Image: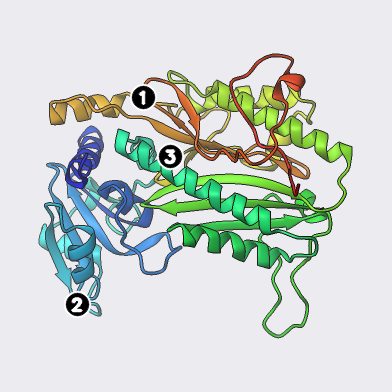
């Protein structure tokens, strides 16, 4: 599949979304949505900003307009949108903003039928785009698998280099370096060691202050590393642990049990179900594996991914489909051919001091594949704890040989 064909499919999804909801057009300014609409192209300058430096306008007929200033236009049109049929709506960098250009060009007086992903033009429909952001074509699933390999390699390389008394800041920097070396951005590089793992679910690494001699926290026994890797708009997430000193049997047992929870959630993620259906299995899994009944209250559990870290998080009543069939049917009518779509998930159950997280693909035929496998790490004996076979592998705590 060529870039142009992928672009046509992604725009067909957006066109279907517009017509299904009675909208005349949508202004896409967010980095994730620009990537979703273009099959992975970049509109950012500030790497980790939600909003890009320029926008894309798609109308209900599927016509596409680049909306940007004179600074960004040359590179975007030469290197990002050069193969795509886009009209240009340009403006001087100091003069106005994309939404004003769109209003002027289309002579819009009533914005009630125009929408955007940031609220700058009519209604903010970013959350409503979640379903089409999660739908992935065959080529995007292939890209995802390769991104998973790169992310896993970066994580394992980082784990191998960690030594007793390394600082959390140094470990985080190493993960970012290993990601960048493989051509990936690393927007999330969380690190916690020892008691901080038990205290915080989103542990930014401790950092020395500019006017302080105090160093970043050094690891003594165990460290948790959480990484999100971004390339061509797609996001892969994984969490791993390394032991450098002593850890209790209680911690080791809790780690194995939370991996079982993760495996049971993954097993329950099947076509025809909603994220709410899967989440209720998640709640049951916590109880089954001996965790407090409401442990899941302490952190979100992850969910669908794709062109965002999480396109939709699981909750008990979430109606988001595990694998949508409605929008693919509209795309088939639009393009006159069937396009198989899959999706991807990253569940991340956690409890005090432990967490399990991988990214896996759900293919159009319902098959699943973990794309963040770290085969050099030991594996958790899921069968022993679950007392049955399960066709899922979870990495254990890494220890130097």
Pointer 2 residue:
92
Callout in the foreground (3, 2): 3
Q: Position of residue 338 (x, y in %)?
A: 21, 24
Mark number, residue 145: 3
Inter-mark Cα distance, 2 to 1: 45 Å
Estimate how packed mark 1 is, as few (under 14), some (14 to 19) or many (20 or more) residues with alpha carbons within 10 Å: some
Label located before the other in sequence (2 or 1)? 2
Q: Position of residue 190 (x, y in %)?
A: 63, 56
Label located before the other in sequence (1 or 3)? 3
Inter-mark Cα distance, 1 to 3: 15 Å
Instruction: Identify which residue, 347 or 395, lies in the foreground.
Output: 395
Q: Are marks 1 and 3 in contact (CB under 8 Å)?
A: no
292 displayed left or right of 80: right
Q: Is any atom of residue 142 visible in this view?
A: yes
293 displayed left or right of 78: right
Give the residue at x 24% y 24%.
Answer: 329
Label located before the other in sequence (3 or 2)? 2
Screen quadrant of the N terminus = top left
Give the residue at x 32% y 29%.
Answer: 341
Pointer 1 residue:
364
Res 166 quadrant in image: bottom right
Give the residue at x 19% y 77%.
Answer: 92
Estimate how packed mark 3 is, as few (under 14), some (14 to 19) or many (20 or more) residues with alpha carbons within 10 Å: many
Q: Secondary structure at mark 1?
A: loop
Res 28 quadrant in image: bottom left
Q: Secondary structure at mark 3?
A: helix
Q: Position of residue 129 (x, y in %)?
A: 35, 41
195 displayed left or right of 294: right
């Amino acid at each position: 599949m060529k870039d142009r064909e992928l672009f046509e499919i992604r725009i067909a999804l957006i066109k279907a979304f517009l017509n299904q909801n009675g909208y005349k057009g949508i202004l896409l300014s967010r980095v994730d949505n620009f990537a979703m609409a273009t099959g992975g192209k970049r509109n950012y300058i500030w790497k980790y900003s939600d909003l890009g430096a320029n926008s894309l306008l798609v109308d209900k007929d599927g016509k596409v307009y680049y909306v940007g200033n004179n600074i960004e236009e040359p590179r975007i049109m030469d290197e990002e949108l050069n193969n795509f049929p886009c009209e240009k709506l340009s403006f001087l960098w100091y003069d106005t903003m994309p939404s004003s250009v769109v209003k002027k060009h289309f002579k819009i007086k009533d914005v009630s039928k125009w929408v955007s992903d940031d609220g700058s033009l009519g209604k903010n429909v970013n959350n409503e785009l979640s379903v089409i952001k999660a739908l992935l074509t065959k080529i995007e699933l292939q890209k995802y698998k390769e991104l998973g390999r790169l992310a896993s390699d970066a994580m394992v390389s980082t784990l191998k280099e960690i030594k007793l008394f390394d600082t959390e800041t140094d470990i985080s920097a190493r993960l970012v370096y290993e990601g960048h070396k493989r051509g990936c951005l690393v927007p999330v590089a969380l690190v916690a060691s020892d008691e901080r793992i038990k205290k915080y679910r989103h542990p930014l690494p401790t950092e020395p202050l500019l006017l302080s001699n105090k160093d970043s926290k050094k690891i003594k026994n165990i460290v948790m590393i959480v990484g999100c890797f971004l390339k061509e708009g797609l996001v892969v997430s994984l969490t791993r642990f390394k032991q450098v000193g002593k850890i209790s049997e209680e911690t080791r047992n809790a780690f194995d049990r939370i991996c079982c929870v993760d495996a049971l959630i993954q097993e329950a993620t099947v076509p025809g179900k909603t994220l709410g259906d899967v989440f209720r299995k998640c709640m049951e899994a916590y109880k089954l594996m001996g965790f407090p009944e409401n442990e899941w209250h302490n952190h979100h559990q992850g969910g669908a991914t794709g062109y965002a870290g999480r396109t939709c998080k699981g909750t008990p009543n979430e109606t988001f489909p595990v694998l949508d069939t409605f929008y693919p049917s509209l795309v088939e009518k639009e393009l006159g051919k069937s396009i198989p779509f899959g999706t991807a998930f990253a569940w991340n159950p956690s409890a005090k001091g432990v967490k399990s997280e991988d990214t896996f693909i759900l293919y159009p035929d319902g098959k699943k594949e973990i794309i963040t496998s770290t085969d050099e790490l030991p594996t958790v004996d899921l069968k022993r704890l679950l007392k049955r076979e399960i066709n899922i592998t979870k990495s254990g705590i890494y220890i130097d040989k």
